[in-house]
Image: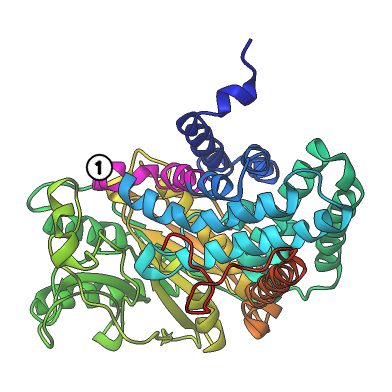
Amino acid sequence: MKTFGDWLASPWRRSLLAALAGALPVFAFPAPSLWWFAYVALVPWILLTRSAPTGRRAAYDGWFGGLGFMLAVHSWLVPSLSVFIVVIAGLLGVLWAPWGWLVRRFLGGVPSPRRGAAALLVLPSGWLMVELVRSWQGLGGPWGLLGSTQWQVEPALRLASVGGVWLLSFLVVAVNVAVAALVSVREVRVPAVAGLVATAAATSAAWVWSPRPDVDGSVRIAVVQPGVIAGDDSGVRRFDREEQLTRQLAGRHVDLIAWGESSVGFDLAKRPDLARRIAALSKETGADILVNVDAERSDKPGIYKSSILVGPKGLTGDRYDKMRLVPFGEYIPFRSLLGWATSVGKAAGVDRRHGTEQVVMSVGHGLRVGPLICFETAFPDMSRHLAQDGADVLLAQSSTSSFQNSWAPEQHATLAALRAAETGRPVVHATLTGVSAVYGPSGERIGSWLGTGASTTRVYDVPLAHGITPYVRYGDWPVQGSLLILALVCAGEGMRAFRLRRTAPRPLVPPARTVHESPARPGR
């Protein structure tokens, strides 16, 4: 009778099981948003990998688990990239291969209590390095960081103000490691319990001692969401709809009006008639309007996505060009090599150009706004720098119209909660087609979401706060700490290998000599 271990002896079956285990954390992300599941979602993957017969097989378990994770978290990209998403997931899944090796190294077999305790630091550090590397914009950016599953948990948001989403990811993985050790390795149950207690203590300490944002005012910001408008003349009809909706804000005493990403499909320098219409709306409503232009510029070559502020007298001169573009969505990396992706999906036919610096805009009433465009809200460093530069409000302009029937709009909208908690600044997430959302300076939701079926406006009373969170002051210190831990692991492994070589038994018989008095060479 075959056992489960016999079934796992097949490399293909084991790889399939690893991919399925790696996909489990997707249920902790929106739209399912089972945030509590994140704390046990990695346990099956860890248990499988620790049982690998060799370090090489454990690395394969890490690789295929990473492939499953990337496919699940980015499943909404399938309509755009088709089978190419499998290629991308397979390449990025390799990043988890060293993590798989670490799982077996520290939890495999019958680990000592000391090795089990080390696993609670080493394995989260290894996971954090994977998140750090794949957060590079050229590899797709930090979409689907494990810590972002905790966007609606108040204690977790408080931790984010201390160490950013990186600290949340570290602690979530640490809890998974502790749970896996508790259910599978009796010898390390004491350090596993100690790890869970330490995590609870860290969360409690952050809750009690981390500084809270000092709310000292409010501002009224209106979001204009025109909804899905398709067709060859969609650019013109969308502008007309945005104009109609914005006119309804007259007399509402708003301080700023935000349109979504690509809300204007024409360069305003080439279309002064459109610029005049927006200026007239600004004068009628008594508020500056932040629009987003997706068009070829007249003053320099190329297509840019730009946040542009318009006042009652026309263009104010404040402009921010999107710096971090979506790979394949807004440009194709190494187009000469990967340009074929346009033939199997909806990859970018023309590369957009990127900006060079972030901008903080003054919109009157003493209000300073830091714009972000689309998936730039996934990058913690960008919102952190805007807070350091004096932004009172972070304003994200986005569009997920290509992914209306997927989990992408909800996932995107929740990223703003993490950025608010990290910086102690409110974040307004204004979209073309939903989900639009607003979060206060502690990451709490302000008002209700505008869903993907809405074509309307909404005014939010946004609380303002000042002061500097520990994350803004000290930056990505959890990442730096993880790098130090992994450096110590590498040093320890190097010393261990050196000791094994020195203590290896020497041959009792001296090597044979040739007629030329040199050692014999095997095979010669």
Assess whether residue 344 is covered by the magenta stretch.
Answer: no
Tell me if 392 is positioned left or right of 215 in this view.
left
Q: Position of residue 86 (x, y in %)?
A: 33, 44
Neighbour tally class for label 1: few under 14, some 14-19, many 20 plus, Cα within 10 Å: some
> Residue type at mark 1?
Ser
* Count of numbered circles in the view: 1
Residue designated by label 1: 82
Picture coordinates of residue 187, whole percent (x, y)? 89, 44
Residue 520 appears in the rendering: yes
At x 82% / y 64%, what residue is drawn? Answer: 207
Circle 1: element type? loop
- Classified by dominant secondary structure, the portion drawn in magenta counts as helix
Residues shaded magenta: 64-85
Residue 261 position, x and y percent, is: 30, 64
State the residue at coordinates (34%, 71%).
Answer: 285
Query: Residue 359 is drawn in which quadrant?
Result: bottom left
Which residue is at the front of the view, 125 or 504?
504
The colour style of the image is rainbow
> Taking 187 as reference, is 160 above or below it?
below
Which sits in the foreground, 253 or 100? 100
Front residue of 240/302: it is 302
x and y percentages locating residue 337 in the rendered image = 17, 63
Residue at (44%, 46%) from the top-left corner? 67
Q: Is residue 332 above or below residue 346?
A: below
Work out which quarter of the rendered image holds the C terminus and state it: bottom left
Q: Is residue 84 left or right of residue 97?
A: left
Towards the viewer: 496 or 442: 496
